[in-house]
Image (cartoon, coloured by chain):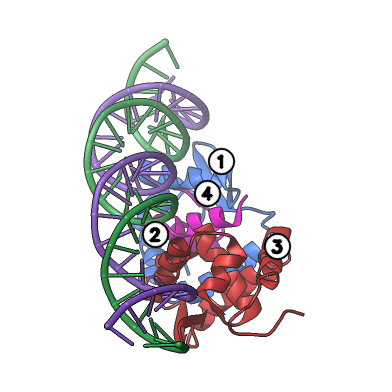
Chain colours: A red, B blue, C purple, D green
Amino acid sequence: MLETDLFKQLSDATRLRCLMLLIAEGELCVCELTHALGLSQPKISRHLAHLRQADLVQDRRVGQWIHYRLHDNLPGWVRAVLDATATELNRRSEYVADRQNLCSMPNRPGSACCA
Amino acid sequence: MLETDLFKQLSDATRLRCLMLLIAEGELCVCELTHALGLSQPKISRHLAHLRQADLVQDRRVGQWIHYRLHDNLPGWVRAVLDATATELNRRSEYVADRQNLCSMPNRPGSACCA
DNA sequence: CGCGTATATACGGTCAAGCATATATTTGGA
DNA sequence: TCCAAATATATGCTTGACCGTATATACGCG
């Protein structure tokens, strides 16, 4: 992957919010991301496809759900960029709100509940 | 500045090369950047304007030359992102080549010579 | 099978961002 | 005051990226 492609992925608000959420929560399925961000399913899915093609995330099928998480083998400097970004952004109210929306989702497929 | 705007700045190859060069060299004028990257002057100037408007760099007039450097007051996490990126990229041959082109420039305005 | 849910992709339209070329502005020096 | 060098901006064009809507695919269950 070209380095400019990494930043192009991060330069879209939807993709950035997805990544910040995945870093905070570990693994989420598409319907959880859709609910947390309050966006349409095709929109989320399309952006996840971008992140997948850029090897920033990987997916795993669990029954009818597809769980996404950060890619296991991110280059060190990419991981460093993402961590520095998440440390800052996940403290901001807009990003906190995404996680709160996630918690308020009824019948979450994977995990039980939020802290 | 919005966080997505930071990454949008970094997602253009010309701007990223300029920033990596400024991190490595400290302060450079437009003609030095133009020579190092082998691109047209208006193109470099336009991209520097973007970086300036995003508060990623600041400029300083010295006679007929305008010297650019990283902005003195970058937020900590932005600095962390840039440093992690530069540590990786400035080892790569394409980026090393930019610095070598800079050294081969005759009559460099500011500094004397390269190491 | 046939249906509902979850997810992915295809299609057409719109808009932002980049480019090359040309020109304007500022400065230093004859 | 005039010219050349350094830098910035304007103009018109093209391309790529995003969006919404519609549709396709895959899975679980009866």
Which quarter shows the C terminus of chain A? bottom right
Q: Are discs 2 and 4 both within one chain?
A: yes
Residue B13 badge:
2
The residue marked by circle 2 belongs to what chain? B
The residue marked by circle 1 belongs to what chain? B
Label 1: element kind: strand
Residue linked to disc 3: A97
**Residue C24: x, y in percent?**
41, 21
The residue marked by circle 4 belongs to what chain? B
Q: Decide: marks 1, 4 in contact (CB < 8 A)?
A: no
Give the mark toward the camera: 1 or 3: 3
Q: Badge 4: few (under 14), some or many (20 or more) residues near its Cα, within 10 Å?
A: many
Residue linked to disc 4: B51
Q: Residue at x 42, y 53 (%)?
A: B33
Q: Is the magenta stretch mostly helix, strand or loop?
A: helix
Q: Decide: marks 4, 3 in contact (CB < 8 A)?
A: no
Give left or right: position of B106 versus A86: left
Give the mark toward the camera: 2 or 3: 3
The residue marked by circle 3 belongs to what chain? A
Q: Decide: marks 1, 3 in contact (CB < 8 A)?
A: no
Assess whether residue B4 is covered by the magenta stretch: yes
Nearest the eye: A47 or C19: A47
Residue stretch in magenta: B1-29
Q: Are discs 1 and 4 both within one chain?
A: yes
Nearest the eye: A95 or B101: A95
Residue B62 badge:
1
Label 2: element kind: helix
Amino acid under disc 4: Leu
